[in-house]
Amino acid sequence: MTMQRARPSLPSDDKRWKIVNATMRRTGYAEHALIEALHSVQDAFGFLDEDAMIFVADSLDLPLSKVFGVATFYHLFMLKPQGRHSCVVCTGTACYIQGAGALIEGLEQRFGVNPGETTEDGALSVMTARCVGACGLAPAVVIDRQVSGKLDSNALNAKLEQEIAQ
């Protein structure tokens, strides 16, 4: 006879928690489904906060330190709310040589944000990535999941201003 452990109650009445819980239930609340559970939370809420990580840890019967460790290891997981638009600047070798640093400096000057930050109005989040796999387009950037390349700082800022205005 196996005993089923009581699952924690949902953190709030927000219906998105039911989606997250359904994802974990579908995988049998298995420990190995941690990344899928975290993706479910991020898809539903846009980022992972402390309450979400505690809920996932309790649901999967994992230590919170393991959930936090996985959430902070993978750069795709966000621990803070993101802006309406995102810009990821590739800092791989080819992009670095072709001017990724200048793109980052241009973003800092124009929008007042450093990599890992979001503008005060929540319009733009700027991030960096070690490589986005578009070395032939160096310096490459990913704006709202669309890869662009061979942009200088002025062209990148203009493109972002256009995206934000839409």
Image: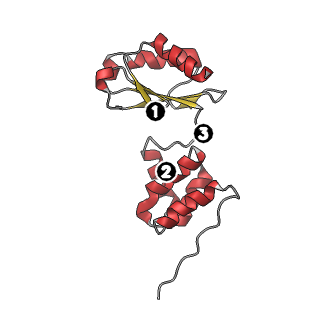
- Circle 1: residue type: Arg
Q: Earlier in the sequence, mark 3 or mark 1?
A: 3
| Disc 1 packing (10 Å; few <14; some 14–19; many ≥20) | few
Q: Earlier in the sequence, mark 2 or mark 1?
A: 2
Q: Nearer the viewer, residue 39 or 112?
A: 39
- Circle 3: residue type: Pro
* Residue at screen point 48% across, 49% down: 71
For disc 3, the marked residue is 81
For disc 1, the marked residue is 145
Residue 134: horizontal and vertical position, in percent?
32, 27
Relative vertical location of residue 111 with respect to residue 70 in this rendering, above or below: above
| Quarter in which the C terminus is drawn | top right
Inter-mark Cα distance, 2 to 1: 17 Å
Residue 20: horizontal and vertical position, in percent?
56, 57
* Residue at screen point 58% across, 70% down: 7
* Residue at screen point 66% across, 56% down: 15
Count of numbered badges drawn on the protein: 3
For disc 2, the marked residue is 39
Q: Earlier in the sequence, mark 2 or mark 3?
A: 2
